[in-house]
Image: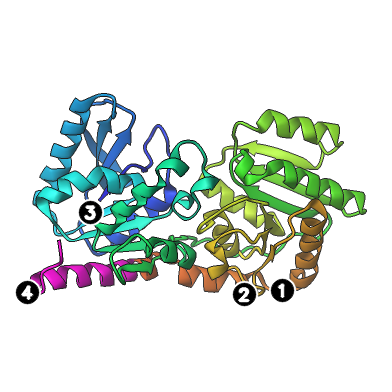
Amino acid sequence: MVTTWFPSRQRPTEAPFNLEHVKAIQRGHDVQVLHVRLGRSQDVESGQYEGIPVTRIGFDPRQPLTLVRAVRQISSALHNADVLHTMAFSSALVAALPWSVRRRPWVHTEHWNGVTNPESVGGIWPRVAWLRHVLRLPHHVTGVTRQLADKLSEFSRPQAASVVPCVVPNGRPVAPYPPLDPLRLVAVGGLIPRKRPLLAVQTVGWLRGQGHNVQLEWAGDGGQRAEVEALIASSGLSPYVRLLGNVAPAEVFALFDHAHLFFLPTEQENFFTSAAEAMSAGRPVVAPHVGGYDDYATPENSRLVDDVTPESLGRAILDVRDRFQNAEPGVIAEPIRRRFSPETVAGLFDDIYTDVSARRAGGRRIAQ
């Protein structure tokens, strides 16, 4: 497994979706993770992370020797591997050269919304998004939503793209909804423009202005924190909107247990892991209709809004409150838990590994 995104003791919240995919795959396979740390020149470092063997390699494009070292390390690992699996787009770029030497069956998994919508991430990426054509090299590519898989198919080999969703592990008992007054909302995401925290505060302001006793807790931090705090104060919402900062994953599920619904007016998502986690806790979701999560976000568990204003979002929140106030949270939680369980996701990857390996071993050598 080669990835440029993977958690560490220093950054435990980095790419939890990759970690959960690896844990699922590890149920039936021996997995070695090579974490290529872009922009760093550190020496090779081997160890374990949550029971997974991980080798961390620095790769700084400004220092060519780090490229040589990374290529050698990946090539050496591929020598004894049956399958190369890359996760995150930049990982495909990093792995392309060593793969060209070893030519193992190659599976790539993508989570990044920059592949679907380059403009959503800004910076230099929209000008170099043609690099997505590197996805022609893997023998199979997977996207975490149908929307993403369809976009990947524009760059991959013919008929080589499919959906393998994120893992949403949640073995906690499903908690009942708390008393309805106040109406408790929870958001999970960075305090960054793409998550639109200012719009979330404005929506709470609209709801309270209409006489509804609403409170919002926001788990996450980021560069807009001061601006969000200023808006909360100037709007007189300090008692009703709490910014919790970064919260450990286990504690996020505790937040869901004390909320009525999940609300995040995000600008762009792919799988939208935090929304799926909220549903796995039995909490319905209110969000804009701006991503592939409509694979699983349906009227049975959510309300997706096209007209994104404080009023339209506020009315959607009230609609969800009324529709689900007498519902059993387990009716929302159980289908999500089954669909995104480690067992289900592991089975999908098993089928892909079997296919790409059998084509090689069965005499129908994979096209190089």
The percent coordinates of residue 339 (x first, y second) are 47, 71
Asked whether 349 falls inside the magenta stretch, the response is: yes
Q: Amino acid at mark 2?
A: Val
Label 4 to label 2: alpha-carbon separation:
48 Å
Q: Which residue is mark 1?
A: 327
Foreground disc of the pair 1, 4: 4
Q: Which residue is mark 4?
A: 363
Which secondary structure lies at badge 2? helix
Left or right position of 284 against 342 = right
Q: Which residues are magenta?
A: 346-368
Q: Amino acid at mark 3?
A: Val
Label 1 to label 3: alpha-carbon separation:
42 Å
Q: Residue 165, can we see it?
A: no
Residue 31 image label: 3
Decide which of 13, 193 is in the foreground and name it.
Answer: 193
Label 3 to label 2: alpha-carbon separation:
35 Å
Which secondary structure lies at badge 4? loop
Residue 195 appears in which quarter of the rendering? Answer: top right
